Amino acid sequence: MPLYRCSSPKARLDDAQREQIAVAFTDIHCELTGAPRTFVHAQFHHHTPAVGEPEFVLHAGIRAGRDEELARRLISRCIEAVSRIAQVPPERIRMRTSSTPASWILEGGRVLPEPGEEDDWLAGSASH
């Protein structure tokens, strides 16, 4: 957690573009939240958009406790990155976020820390 999902038509992205998008999601998330890079995951899925539907559908599942302004900045920057990397107009991209309490998420067999408590959690992972 966090989990970023990018759905696009099957032949739309090559491996290099998927890697660039995954790195962009990680960079953006870590810069905005201060979360460790090891927490960020990216998945890519294929879909066939209906006529008039966005070509790209993005979703970010993040830990609860983030404010609305952070979510708006995250969405804006992720759409900008995908637009640039995939060379698609931003209006062909839709994104949403969802928040899950940290206590509901396991990472490496351990319950994730609350936002801002990552250092203590990471220090404890050396003993596990």
Image (spheres, rainbow, N blue to C red):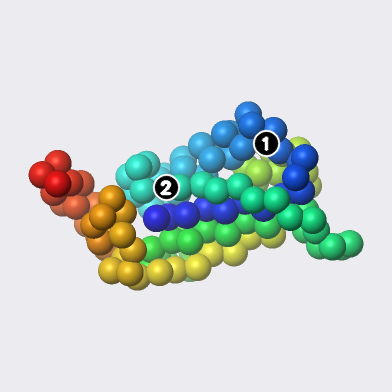
Which amino acid type is marked by label 1? Ile
Give the side of residue 54 with respect to residue 104, left or right: right
Q: Which mark is residue 40?
A: 2
Pinpoint residue 118: horizontal percent, then vertical percent: 24, 52
How much space separates mark 2 and mark 1, taking CA atoms? 19 Å
Q: Which residue is pictured at 84% across the width and 62% down the height? A: 50
Question: Who comes first in sequence, dot 2 or dot 1?
Answer: 2
Q: Quadrant of the N terminus?
A: bottom left
* Location of mark 1 (residue): 85
Quadrant of residue 47 in the image? bottom right
Q: Are marks 2 and 1 in contact (CB under 8 Å)?
A: no
Q: Position of residue 18 (x, y in %)?
A: 61, 37
Front-lying residue, 102 or 9: 9
Furthest toward the top, the residue is 16
Task: Decide: few, some or many residues near mark 2? Use Cα within 10 Å; few <14, some 14-19, many ≥20.
Answer: many
Measured from the top left, where is residue 37 in percent x and y?
37, 41
* Neighbour tally class for label 1: few under 14, some 14-19, many 20 plus, Cα within 10 Å: some
